[in-house]
Image: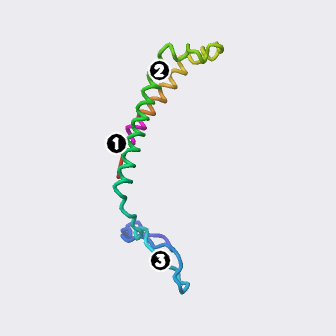
Amino acid sequence: MTADPRMPLKSHPRPFVDSKLPNGAPRLATLGSELQPAASPGRLWRHRLLMLAFVFFCAALGVVLVVFPWRDEWAHNRLMVGYPTLQKLMASGFVRGVSSGLGLVDIWIGFWEAVHYRE
């Protein structure tokens, strides 16, 4: 049986089988029948602070990844003294550009989460 495209959609949610009643019959429930309990104030503030910390972390890491690759310390530091090939690779514009691009993506993720935050 196919639905008529001119007919409006049903306005009530479709039932689904949730569990069985004591007599063995299936218990029907709607998708919206289970309400979530309200969050406690402590849990709400913890969520807010974690979101703020996440946004700050993303923004700070993104700024570091955008700025630091274009400084001399990026390729010429104590960790890479014995690896001249790695120094040349890290000094290439491609690697610097990729890391700066990742920094911009990281900043975007942080601000996206801040703008789309819902309680």
The residue wearing badge 3 is 28
The residue wearing badge 2 is 68
Q: Amino acid at mark 2?
A: Phe
Q: Residue at x 54, y 87 (%)?
A: 23
Q: Which residues are magenta?
A: 108-113
Q: Which of 10/20 is in front? A: 20
Q: Is residue 94 above or below residue 54?
A: above
The residue wearing badge 1 is 115
Please identify the quarter of the rendering in which residue 77 is found: top right
Q: Which of 79/90 is in front? A: 79
Q: Residue at x 52, y 17 (%)?
A: 74
Disc on the earlier residue, 2 or 1:
2
Between circles 2 and 3, the one closer to the viewer is 2
Q: Is residue 113 above or below residue 76?
A: below
Q: Are marks 3 and 1 in contact (CB under 8 Å)?
A: no
Q: Position of residue 99 (x, y in %)?
A: 51, 25
Q: Residue at x 65, y 13 (%)?
A: 82
Which secondary structure lies at badge 2?
helix
In three-dimensional space, the C-alpha distance between marks 2 and 1, rounded to whole angstroms, equals 27 Å
In three-dimensional space, the C-alpha distance between marks 3 and 1, rounded to whole angstroms, equals 38 Å
